[in-house]
Structure formats: structure tokens, C-alpha cells
Amino acid sequence: MTEHGAVQLKKLDDYRWLIPREGGMRTDGMVYADERMMGDIKKDQSLQQVKNVAFLPGIVGPSLAMPDIHWGYGFPIGGVAAFDEKEGIVSPGGVGYDINCGVRLMRSGLERNDIQGKIKGIVDALLVNIPSGVGSHRKDLKLDKHQQRKVLQKGAQWAVDQGYGRWEDLEHIEEKGRIPNADPDLVSPKAVERGRAQLGTLGSGNHFVEVGYVAEVYEEEIGRALGLAKDQVTIIVHTGSRGLGHQVCDDSIRVMLQAAQHYGIELPDKQLCCAPLGSKEGKEYLAAMACAANFAFANRQIITHWVRETFEQILHMGPSTLKLDLIYDVCHNIAKLETHEVAGKEQRLCVHRKGATRAFPPHHPDIPPDYREIGQPVLIPGDMGRCSYVLVGTERAYEETFGSTCHGAGRVMSRHQAKKSARGRNVTQELEAKGIYVRGASMGTIAEEIPEAYKDVSDVVDVVQGAGIGKKVAQLKPMGVIKG
Amino acid sequence: MGYELVDHTADLGIRVWADDIKGLFEEAARAFFDIITDLSKVEAHLQREVVVQGSSREVLMVAWLNELLYLHEVEGLLFCDFSVAEIDEGAVTGVAGGEVFDEGRHSIKTGVKAVTYHQLEIKEQEGRWQAQVIFDI
């Protein structure tokens, strides 16, 4: 057993590390990582955060961390924790500020060579058609109060109703693009105001739209079921609930700080504040969170529509030639009520995934019929210089991690370090030399997002594959990226 | 009065110090907008009164900065000048001076999603006030 600060670690196998229960912990911690990665993970306080989550009432199974774990606020990013519906709690910090930040992947009827010479035109047009900077939004998307409420209630379904995309898109979105029991009356006027002009915008930070191609297919049959083949052009959209979600989280944390005190819940870190799932505060958070999640689904759906329009505009091709179909859309930051088997019995749980992806196995009823044999698609974006992965969920993930797996690369360098490291370099030119054309609203963002600021996503994916909590299907490589 | 950046793997924070608590809130706001934009290009052409409530100094600090973030996002304002008139256990009253974001003159260095309660700390030591605040980027 090795010790890091106050955190004890016991290596179980090549990919699993146990943090044994001690003191106020109600359960063990479990971290998925290999030896080399654990070296990086130990550098910040994320292991202590895995431990802190284990203190919370009603936790079922271990406090889990995926290999892309890094230091978050309260809960670690890459953390998964399930709580019993009756005895457990819900915590806004276990979801994060960017509620339903997520990723969607589209395939196309195009091959890499078809767009090689046109990638700059496509990326420049995407930057025009999809707003991302401060205060920028499309003039043709204006919502009245009634419409705003509908967005929060109906999510991507509202977007399709308005002509953004197609009905068949909805089948390929987690929860069909609409989390039930969303109550707009529980979203503060401030949150609504912050969201008003931000629907259909990408936002800053690590959000992006990436045009790429399938570099490798590892599982031919599953690849076929997803409609993916080598050299085919793909598009990834990564964004979330923008200011609306951030405000819902902030509003809820204020409520939960009082609630935790009121219900006598001891917190090792303020940011873990929470309330019992059955309490008024707990229920109200889930209903407001659902609104923010639906806003994010609508946001990705609208952006998808503009991506399709951009391709039509630049390549002068129609939808039937472009075949820009949605493969799947997953949430990265969410808490959901799900039924899982625990010690041989079905149990209703609130599963918090913060920087983690749902990864349900084949034959799960929540998977769309056309993917039922292969398992739920899982989309793992990497940094803008390397690659991304398509995985599917596994039975083992269902048994061990409440059907969850990793969500991305995970940072190793702080933004400040990344900027320092990028000083004096022309990052866009470096990437262009590698055949990747990157444009962003702010060049500062591009410097913060340099590839070496992240873990190599291939290492992260190898760990989940090795541990059996995800199955690698295909690797995607970027050709052009717009950053928020 | 002054501040320094606190490095955090995914996010970014500030450590701020001042002679009194009003100055601490003013300096935190200045540091916050120094992260967001190049402050030397922002002028105080207009003013907004800011009043926030909270149950402790820590909650007030987060509420104060989040209110400024709200005005930044919703009205596209950049602030450079802050004056806190009153702080008690339940509320902060102050004025923020700045101008509307102008794409030609201003740039956004870092987009901030939220002001967090993570490792939030406000303390007084030998007559000097110090605060640490972490932002979600």
C-alpha cells in the first residue's frame, strides 16, 4: 500500500486502485488508471476528492473515478457516484456548472479526399454560422418567454419542432434529447436571462466543433452498425447549457449550502453541499437541472442544423448526398434516476456523472433499437491535435460503474501553464503543419487548449478498454476545428 | 492591495489581499476582470449599482463576483473600476464602472463560467485581509 498525503491507495490490478474506507468515509473509493497515469493523478488533490465524495449519505457502491480524473471543485472531474433514492442525496457539485455539457457525433456520406481542399472554407463558414464569442448570437434565433419555457421543457424535441434537424435525430440522443420532469418555474429569472441570448452558441473554454475522419475501425461489425468506415468524414459537436446551466448550478449551491446544514449533513468540502433526494430542495434541484440539460440538448441540436447548412452551402450538395446523420449524443455532466442491480436486487439510484459518460451495455432498454445489439455509443473527444474515440458500453461497466466510463482526455497542465508553454509559438501554424486547420474566437483559448495540456486520450481509452468498462470501436482524427 | 493567480489543473483562481474588507472585495473584482480581459483597454464610461445578499462573507464574495459576471454576460459589460460602499453580514452594496464590450477594441482573454465555493477562503490576519477564489473556466 502506498500513501499520498492522507490518501491510501491499494493497487488491485493493472487498471484498478482502491482507496480503502476509513474515518468518516461510508464506502471505498475506486480509481481506474494505469501506473503511469496514477503518477499524474497524484499531483493534484483529485484523490482526496474521491475520498470526500465517499463521506456523503446514502452512497451506493464505491466513490468512482475514471482515468481522465482531474481536480474539480468538490467532486473530482471524471467522478461517478450513485445514491439510493430513499436514503441518499443529490448534489449540484456532483454535476458541475456546465449541466449536460456533452458531445454528439455525426457521420457523413463523404470521404476525407472529398473535402481535403475545402476544409478551410468549411471551418471559416462554421465560425461565421455558429456564434461563440461574447454577446454574439444569430439574429434569426429570437425567443419570446413562451418559447423559452418550451426549450426548457422539451429540449432537442423543441428544436426539431422548430425545424432544426430531423425527427430521427431524437432517437439517437441520450434520453431522446429531453429529460422528463423539467419545471421552468424552478429556474430563476437570472438563469433564464443568461440563457436567452446564448441558445445556439458554442461558448468558450474547451467547447468546439470538429470536422474529422475515421482513421481506424477496431470492431468492423460494430462500426458497420454505427455506419462508420475508414476515411469517412465525421463531425463532433461539444458544448453545454451555457450561462443558463451555470446560473442554475450557482443558484442551487446557495440553496444546498443551507439545506446541508438544515438536514445535518456533514461536508468535508463546501462545494459538496447537497440535500436528500426526497427533500423539497433535492427535488427542486433535479427539476431545474432537467431544464438546463434540456437547454443543452436543444443547443447541440440547433448547432447540428447549422453544421448541416454550412456543409450544404460550401460543398453545394444536398442532404441526401451529404448524409449528415446523427450517430449519438451523450451527456458528460448530469445526475439521473436510474434502476441498477445492486447485490442481486434492483435499486433506484441517482447516478451523478461529472465528466463521465453513460455507457449502457447491449440489450439495455434505454438504447435505441438500431444499436441494441452493440451497446450504447460512447464518444470520447481528445485534444485538438491528436484524436478522438468512439466506444460502446459494456456489461462490465454496468456491473462495476453503474454503466459509466470516461469522457475525454483530462487536463494535465493548468491553463496558465499551457499559455506559458505556448508563448512565442504559433500554435495554429503548428497544427496546420499537421493538417489540422483551427480557428477560434479568441487566440488565448487556442493557447490554453494546446494538445500537450491534456493527457493523451489514447492512454485514457486504453485503460477503460483494459478494465473492460468500454469497448473501443473507432478512432477519429481532426481536419478542421472551431474553438469557442 | 494586490492579487496573484492561483493555478488549478482545469480552472483558475485568485489570491487577493487588501487593508480592509471593502478593499478586498474591490480588488477581487478587479482581479476577476483582469482575467477576463485586458483591463488597460477598458474605461469607466458607465456605472452599475450592485447589491447582493448572502449569509456569510464567503457567500457574499461569490455572489458579488457572480453578479458582475451576470452583468458581463447579459449586458456585455466589462468593468474596471469598483467601489464598495457597505458590507455587513447580510449584504454588499457597491458600484462598478465600465463600458460595453466593443469587438474592435476589447478582447476576451478567458471566458469564465462561474465563481465557485471550492477552496473559498476569506481571512483577516494582523490587520490584513486575504481571500482566495477559484473560477470555473
Image: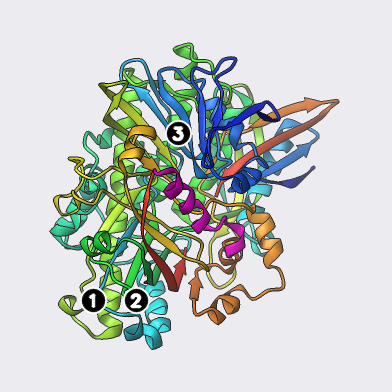
Image quarter of residue A291: top left
Q: Are marks 2 and 3 on the same chain?
A: yes
Other-residue count near label 2 (Cα within 10 Å), few / some / many at <14 / 14–19 / ≥20: some
Q: Which mark is residue A413?
A: none
Any part of residue B12 in sight = no
Other-residue count near label 1 (Cα within 10 Å), few / some / many at <14 / 14–19 / ≥20: some
Q: CA distance from mark 1 to mark 2?
A: 11 Å
In the rendered structure, which segment of residues is drawn in magenta? A450-468
Task: Estimate the x, y position of residue A366 in percent, counting from the top left.
Answer: 20, 42
Residue in view at x 68 percent, y 48 percent: B31
Residue bearing mark 3: A94
Examine the residues drawn in magenta and state their main secondary structure. Answer: helix
Task: Estimate the x, y position of residue A360 in percent, counting from the top left.
Answer: 28, 42
Image position of A269 (left or right of A468): right
Residue in view at x 73 percent, y 40 percent: B16
| Labels 2 & 3 near each other (Cβ < 8 A) | no
Could you tell me the amino acid type at mark 1?
Gly
Residue in view at x 69 percent, y 36 percent: B132
Q: CA distance from mark 2 to mark 3?
A: 38 Å
Q: Which mark is residue A231?
A: 2
Assign the N terminus of chain A to one quadrant of the image: top right
Secondary structure type for disc 2? loop
Given the image, what chain letter belongs to the residue carrying mark 3?
Answer: A
Secondary structure type for disc 3? helix
Residue A239 or B31: which is nearer the viewer? Answer: A239
Could you tell me the amino acid type at mark 3?
Gly
Secondary structure type for disc 1? loop
Image quarter of residue A404: top left
Task: Estimate the x, y position of residue A394 in percent, counting from the top left.
Answer: 32, 44
Residue bearing mark 1: A109
Given the image, what chain letter belongs to the residue carrying mark 1?
Answer: A
Residue B64 or A435: which is nearer the viewer? Answer: A435
